[in-house]
Image (cartoon, rainbow, N blue to C red):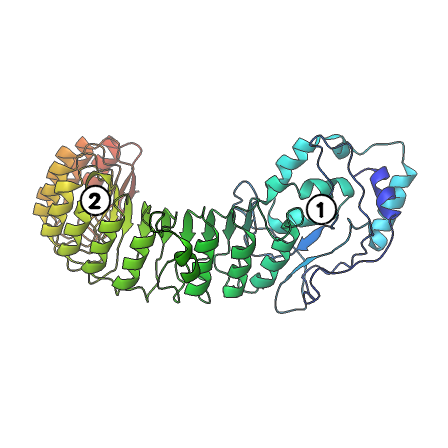
Amino acid sequence: MGANNGKQSGSEGKGSSSISSDLSSSTDQTSTKAPKNAATSEDSDLSMRTLSTPSPALILPPHLHPLSPLLPLSAPFNSSSSTSSSETVAMVHATSPPPFFSATHSRRRATREHHQGASVPIDLLPDQIFLDVFARLPTNQLCRCARVCRRWYNLAWDPRLWRSIRLTGDVLHVDRALRVLTRRLCQDTPNVCLMLETLVASGCRRLTDRGLLTVAQCCPELRRLEVAGCYNVSNDAVFEVVSRCPNLEHLDVSGCCKVTCISLTREVSLKLSPMHGQQISIRYLDMTDCLALEDEGLHTIAAHCTQLTHLYLRRCMRLTDEGLRYLVIYCPAVRELSVSDCRYVSDFGLREIAKLEGRLRYLSVAHCGKITDVGVRYVAKYCSRLRYLNARGCEGLTDHGLEYLAKSCPKLKSLDIGKCPLVSDAGLELLALNCFNLKRLSLKSCESITGRGLQVVAANCFDLQLLNVQDCDAPLDALRFVKRHCKRCVIEHTNPAFF
């Protein structure tokens, strides 16, 4: 941001207008005067064409996790900005990059003009370095960088920085933010945003069907959509998204209680030929806590999403064994499946799941009280390549079930049999003598497990990385034996004498 940039920006004309007149409030309290025309950045290594619209200011609440355009950002952005409005909206000015403003900026510009001969070191960095830095910024910081100078403005709107958008928070007016952002990103290709591939709006309770419809209409290249916890989203909007975004592969609608099905719209279904099929390209689907999902809805999902490989139906308590039968018929490629807390799923359901055979790698049936050794035997016999099994709270599971599992699934790496009171040292010994690759084992609240079983596990499973023996009768010497033989193992326990 050298002196030349400051002078050039300050010499621009005045006057600004808003793309969307109803976006009347923002958390950014600084007034902006935008010039009429934007000049091109001829020294850009990327030879980018200058955009004719100005820098945006998509301001998010300071406690939220905003967008990380290319790389994930774990820490939230902390800002001292205050707002007089109860909601946060997005604002994008419709003219060229704004000049420096306010008395503070005028003083800084005067200082730079006084030292015109001295160059600012940051201005000497090449464009690629700036892009690498911008790629690690959240949405609000990226938009603010676009307001610094003309060069930063051009770089901040590089399409590669806008392949993903992350919006989170209860107070953010997401519908408006999506409308403004998609309009800005559609500038070079009117009404179509070809760059956006990922949209994360999890936890945005103010997101409605209107916002998703905007995305469906403008972003045909969308590949990943996460709207977990957005309980105002319904089937209609989801149908529009999956119908208009043929490349969508990852869909997370967990906690969307109004979503009961995933299907194409009727209009799109009628246009497709029978040979083409009414199929959706979704491979990953999370419908956790979609409490209204029933067997008929799962039937429709399976019939349309035949390419599913990852399906999570946790706490969909209306599902039964019949729904699982539909799933196995239409979706033979499922590798990961969770039906934990589905209380109506029984051994008959596991018999259907076992038809997935060697393709199944991950299975969770936690707290499915109707499952016994019979169902586990079906899975162990046919799904020999199983790597992960969560059977926590399946009180009908005994040592016989562990024996079937140990002898048929020797490559098992993770097993959770917590709160299974009928599992004892005998079953644990059979498991340890056959599953040498075991890395994670949870025995929480298994009352029949003692030190003998734990020592056999430690003596045979050298790669053990996590052992949960909370609320178990595990003596101190057994815990020390495990620690001595499994150097990398983290032991979760409730024995105050062991540390």
Amino acid type, mark 2:
Leu
Q: Decide which of 267, 236 is in the foreground and name it.
A: 267
Q: Quadrant of the N terminus?
A: top right
Considering depth in this image, is 490 or 43 the residue closer to the camera?
A: 43
Q: Residue at x 15, y 59 (%)?
A: 370
Quadrant where the C terminus sits is: top left
Please provide percent x and percent y for residue 195: 57, 44
**Vertical placement of residue 44 versus 37, above or below:** above
- SS under mark 1: loop
Residue shown at 37% from the left, 58% from the top? 262
Q: Is residue 264 left or right of residue 476?
A: right
Across and down, in percent, residue 198 comes to 51, 47
Which residue is identified by label 2?
A: 356
Mark carried by residue 146: 1
Q: Amino acid at mark 1?
A: Ala
In front of the other: 196 or 447? 196
